[in-house]
Image (cartoon, grey):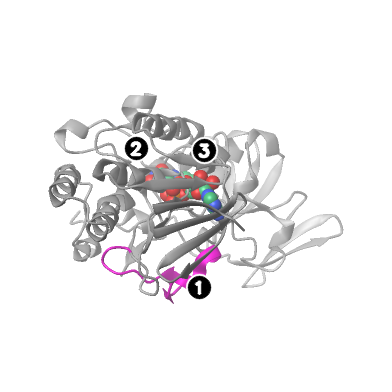
Amino acid sequence: MKVVKTIDVIVVGAGSAGIGVAVVLKRMGINFQILEKEEIGASFKKWPEETQFISPSFTGNFFKMPDLNAITPETSPAFNLLTEHPTGEEYQEYLETVSEFYKLDINTGVTVETVHKKKGTFIVMTNKGEYHSQFLIWAAGEYQYPDRRAFKGSELCMHYSDISSFEEIKTDERIVIGAYESGCDAAINLCREGTSVTLLDRSNSFELVNSDSSYSLSPFTRDRLIEEDLNFEYKPESGVKEVRFDKGKYVAETVSNKQFISSHKPINCTGFTSSLSLIESLFETHEGYPILNNFDESTKTKNLFLVGPQVKHGNALFCFIYKYRQRFSIVANRIAVRNKIDNSIIKRVVQDYKDANFYLKDLACCDGECVC
Ligand SMILES: Cc1cc2nc3c(=O)[nH]c(=O)nc-3n(C[C@H](O)[C@H](O)[C@H](O)COP(=O)(O)OP(=O)(O)OC[C@H]3O[C@@H](n4cnc5c(N)ncnc54)[C@H](O)[C@@H]3O)c2cc1C
């Protein structure tokens, strides 16, 4: 296949991670291109219509406390969208505004199919031909890669990511499997539509409280769960091992052999695999997460970097925007140094990110507990 283009850096994905890191590359004067299979912020646009951000937006940027959902130190979704908990569609608007403002080079309609490395060059095969680069930043996310094999019979269920609106799928009753953020979101929104929900939880998420937001339900979700008139039955310690379709009914059977029966497709909210499945041979892994060095670079493939919610160091999971945005300038810094960008430019940009608390290098800090 003929070579389409050779660029210094390819960024795969124009979601919050890809756009966020691209802004730093742009500010450092690095030659890059974003390859995006659909459109800017495509995953956010696919969220159910009623779903909102759980992390709040509030404009505190100029007091060095940037909006938790901002992807650059000088922008704020709260300022831009005038709401505290944006919907996916609203947040996509914010991402479009940021891309336009920084004049990012985004090639939409380009799906990355495979990547391999030959003699120091990444060969990126896409539906629009072949791209070559010295550096590759993977930012293709998780949402568009749902886990449809979490339990036997899960193909009989509707996955959370298949839902475009809870209003469209309202019924008299439904089983929701999984009670972390997406399961609770499905339960709350279905109840608001008048559906009575049975919420099956493998553990006991309602009781679990941890000061790291990656491991505990958010306050926004807890507030919504105690709303009046929510008609749901919560079943902790009810991990589903199988769903069957029997005599016109869906039967969800738990590991302790309890059965829950419904006339409607259960909703599978057990999570996502990851776009990393496309390039898994380029990473070493530990417990399902890619092993990264201190610059979020693959320990197996030099010059391959990861940004976004799959970044994990020790117990610190960078699955929220306010967490993983703190690694954008670390990745860009490393690429800039290797690409021989003028040191004074690198320093200035990194300092801006440091000043705004958009820079986290000391990963030891992430294991603490709040004192109260
Ligand atoms: C219901 C829900 C609520 C959430 N709420 C919050 C919240 O309140 N706060 C928060 O911080 N986080 C929240 N998150 C997590 C947040 O959505 C993710 O952190 C964020 O979307 C990840 O951004 P990303 O850029 O890595 O991935 P994505 O947003 O998924 O972007 C990846 C992009 O890559 C493109 N792509 C995928 N595969 C390819 C390919 N092969 N070739 C080319 N392009 C490709 C996609 O089209 C997409 O545009 C929530 C997630 C969900 C599901």
Residue that appears at 80% across and 60% down? 245
| Residue 41 in the image, given as x and y percentages of width and height | 49, 39
Instruction: Let me know if residue 294 is in the magenta part.
Output: yes
Q: What residue type is disc 1 on?
A: Ser
At mark 2, the secondary structure is: loop
| Residue 207 in the image, given as x and y percentages of width and height | 41, 58
Q: Residue furthest front?
A: 2
Going from the N terminus, do you reach mark 3 or mark 1 first?
3
Residue 202 visible to an observer of this rendering: no
Q: Which residue is mark 3?
A: 51
Q: What residue type is disc 2 on?
A: Pro
Q: Which residue is mark 1?
A: 281
Q: In this view of the protein, which residue sits in the foreground, 77 or 254?
A: 77
Instruction: Report if the CB atoms under discs 2 and 3 are less than 8 Å apart.
Output: no
Residue that appears at 64% across and 46% down? 162
Above or below, 135 relative to 88 = below
